[in-house]
Amino acid sequence: MRSLQPSPAPASPSPSTTLEPGLLSVLRVLVGIQILLLPATLAAFPLRAPAGIPPGGAAVAGDVLRSIALDSDSSLGPAFLRALMVITLALFAFWPGLPARMGRWYLPVFAVYYAVAAALSHAIFTAWVLKYVEVVLAADTPLALLLAMESGWTLFVLLLFGVVMVAWQYDMRRVMWYVLLLAVAELFAFSPLLLSALPWPPLVFQIIIHVAIYVMVSFVITRMMAAQRAQRRALTEANIQLTQYAASQEQLAVSRERNRMARELHDTLAHSLSAVAVQLEAVDSAMTTAPNEAHDILGKALAQTRSGLTETRRAMHALRASPLDDLGLALAIRNLATTTAQRGGMALTLELPETQPALPPAVRSEARRVGKESTSR
């Protein structure tokens, strides 16, 4: 009998090598949304030369935005760069087999490129806003600062998605490195504002608020994912233990059945054969000296052989699976009724329920016995 060796628990997928379940789908949804928003983003870039508000006109925010949207001009470089960055993100997300080929480098490369692309795009857009606000409003600093800070919150939302993805996959220590990268990326995104005549304390304060929110969100998500990974490991270990327990129970049942078969064979076949062997030796000894006695002993040996054969057949029959174990209660009763009807040349009409309640073995055995008695009478 082979010994049971507890199989080692399979190593759970490392967060640094295998994407967490569902992460790739969320990543693709995020990139898909950016693809859908790309036409609206490109439409915001200017196509014609800037025109200021007519002298004496009311310089309100609506006039500014209208002038930027309708009376502006710029090269197509910024728009082309924005489209190129989104297309690259789409290739990262939807290229077949790319996550498997890149392995553990897939998410880090995607997250870093995502942050850098968002910061670069925001810096280009901010420089354009500053240029045209200056042209239209003759450097109205408060409005320029307001527009810049509002667009900063748009950048914050984009980068927050990156924080969620990284925190979903990695532990807090790795996420903090990514948050540091985002802080540098936001400084770069706000660099056109910091290098202009705008006051920088509100901008720096906004970046600090963003980083604080990144850290809080990262902490919550990493704790949730750590608890989820611990639950998955516990479930995997429980499944392994259950499988080992089922295997040990099966092997124990086989071992018990083998011992029972050995006892049955020892009590029937081995005992009968040993008795026959002794009697045949006695026949051999008495064959020449006492033929009559040898004949009697031979008769006893034949009787012992027949008795042993009967006991062996009984033991083999007992070792076979019972009809209840082999067929179940309903099929066992159907077979009894069919056999009795065929033996008596009778037509059989039998109605049995399609589903049977779960009955204890003793009750099922007694029900079959009642059915056997009923059909035999």
Image (cartoon, helix red, strand yellow):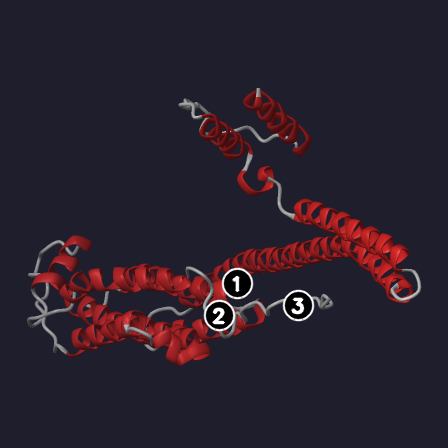
Residue 371 is drawn in which quadrant? top right
Q: Nearer the viewer, residue 221 or 361?
A: 361
The residues tagged by marks 2 and 3 sit, at their Cα atoms, a distance apart of 41 Å
Is 280 situated left or right of 102 in this image? right
Residue beneath the point at 66% across and 69% down: 8
Q: Residue furthest right?
A: 289
Q: Earlier in the sequence, mark 2 or mark 3?
A: 3
Residue 274 is drawn in which quadrant? bottom right
Q: Position of residue 227 (x, y in %)?
A: 59, 56
Q: Position of residue 262 (x, y in %)?
A: 77, 57
SS at badge 2: helix
Is 122 situated left or right of 133 in this image? right
Could you tell me if the residues under marks 2 and 3 are in contact, i.e. CB atoms within 8 Å? no
Q: Quadrant of the C terminus?
A: top right
Q: Which mark is residue 372?
A: none
Which residue does the numbered mark 3 point to in the structure image? 7
Which residue does the numbered mark 2 point to in the structure image? 179
Q: Is residue 145 visible?
A: no
Could you tell me if the residues under marks 1 and 2 are in contact, i.e. CB atoms within 8 Å? yes
The residues tagged by marks 1 and 2 sit, at their Cα atoms, a distance apart of 7 Å
Q: Earlier in the sequence, mark 1 or mark 2?
A: 2
Which residue does the numbered mark 1 point to in the structure image? 215
Q: Is residue 332 visible?
A: yes
Residue beneath the point at 29% across and 70% down: 122
Three-letter code for the amino acid on which mark 2 is drawn: Val
Is 115 situated left or right of 266 in this image? left
Q: Earlier in the sequence, mark 3 or mark 1?
A: 3
